[in-house]
């Protein structure tokens, strides 16, 4: 008898038994103290899965920064878990997001410094999170269903924004970002606004194949960068979430040179 295997879906969330055990045993309060030492005001609201997600993401990114000298050392000023009804922008249905400039995001909290990261509480429910990731991969909107992909995607927005502010300066009204990045003729916010509202993204078909429909249809270099970097980063991990190669070596061969060049420009390499 010839049983046909369904090879079209390879769902690898990366959540094996030992990782699940680590998540179950994670000390959220201690992780928040560790994040505070790194300059991150993190409040995971007691969620072990979300806390673990960011702890793994932080370790992976700092490991890559050290081993391969990539500029992944930027950290979000704050990390928060939200319920959708707490958002000022009620229409925001995103699973997670990163604010570009400093603004009030949650009704009950003070404004958050730009490049802070927010994660929806649905990511706290592991079966639901796996379902949503799997769905994204099956319908072709995302290239990876790895459980770290949500935190890494937002963290890569934070890295990208910081790299732009570092290069072009910050011209907004946030005193903290002004102190960090203010300079004569600063135009970082302007550059971000252009890069997130492009008239179109060239090589659409190939791009969709390599980064998924979500980024390819976004008209935003930010989404292309975040999705591509997330993909090549999770592909550089072993099953215990150790970094085993330089993510840049996983750059898809068929990705048009135009995008490879753009990524190198962003990373300043
Ligand atoms: Zn995004």
Image (cartoon, helix red, strand yellow):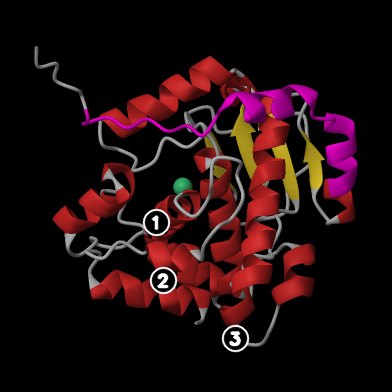
> How far apart are labels 2 and 1 at the CA level?
9 Å
Q: Which mark is residue 228?
A: 1
Is the N terminus in the top left, top right, bottom left or bottom right quadrant? top left
Which span of residues is magenta-colored? 7-34
Mark 1 and mark 3 lie on one chain; the one further toward the N terminus is 3
> How far apart are labels 1 and 3 at the CA level?
31 Å
Q: Quadrant of residue 144?
A: top left
Q: Report the side of 39 relative to 205 (left or right).
A: right
Mark 2 and mark 1 lie on one chain; the one further toward the N terminus is 1
Element type at mark 2? helix
Above/below status of 33 relative to 166? above
Question: Residue, x 70% and y 34% (percent of image)?
Answer: 52
Q: Which mark is residue 185?
A: 3
Q: Badge 2 is on which residue?
A: 263
Check whether the beta carbons of the residues at disc 2 and disc 1 lie within 8 A of each other. Answer: yes
Locate residue 8, reporting x and y percent: 21, 31
Above/below status of 114 relative to 183? above
Question: Residue, x 47% and y 51% (percent of image)?
Answer: 230
Q: Quadrant of residue 114?
A: bottom right
| In-front residue for pair 113/5 | 5
Q: Which mark is residue 220?
A: none
Q: Nearer the viewer, mark 2 or mark 3?
A: 2
Extreme residue toward the top, this view: 1
Is residue 82 in sight in this rendering?
no
Locate residue 192, reporting x and y percent: 48, 66
Extreme residue toward the front, this view: 1
Locate residue 207, reporting x and y percent: 23, 56
Element type at mark 1? helix
């Amino acid at each position: 008898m010839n049983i046909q295997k369904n090879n079209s879906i390879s769902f690898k969330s990366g959540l094996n038994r030992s990782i699940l055990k680590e998540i179950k045993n994670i000390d959220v309060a201690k992780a928040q103290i560790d994040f505070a030492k790194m300059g991150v005001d993190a409040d995971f609201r007691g969620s072990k899965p979300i806390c673990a997600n960011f702890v793994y993401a932080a370790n992976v990114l700092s490991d890559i920064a050290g081993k391969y000298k990539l500029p992944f050392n930027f950290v979000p000023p704050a990390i928060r878990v939200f319920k959708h009804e707490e958002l000022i922008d009620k229409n925001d249905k995103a699973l997670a997001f990163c604010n570009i400039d400093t603004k009030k995001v949650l009704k009950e909290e003070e404004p958050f410094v730009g490049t802070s990261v927010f994660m929806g509480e649905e990511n706290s429910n592991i079966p639901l999170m796996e379902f949503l990731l799997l769905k994204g991969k099956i319908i072709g909107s995302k290239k990876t269903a790895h459980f770290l992909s949500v935190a890494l995607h937002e963290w890569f927005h934070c890295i990208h924004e910081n790299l732009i502010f570092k290069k072009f300066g910050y011209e907004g009204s946030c005193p903290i970002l002004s102190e960090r990045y203010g300079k004569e003729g600063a135009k970082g916010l302007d550059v971000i606004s252009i890069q997130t509202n492009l008239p179109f993204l060239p090589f659409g078909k190939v791009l969709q194949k390599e980064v998924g429909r979500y980024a390819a249809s976004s008209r935003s270099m930010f989404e292309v960068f975040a999705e591509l970097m997330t993909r090549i980063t999770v592909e550089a991990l072993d099953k215990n979430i150790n970094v085993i190669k330089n993510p840049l070596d996983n750059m898809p061969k068929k990705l048009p040179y135009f995008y490879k060049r753009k990524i190198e420009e962003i990373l300043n390499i």
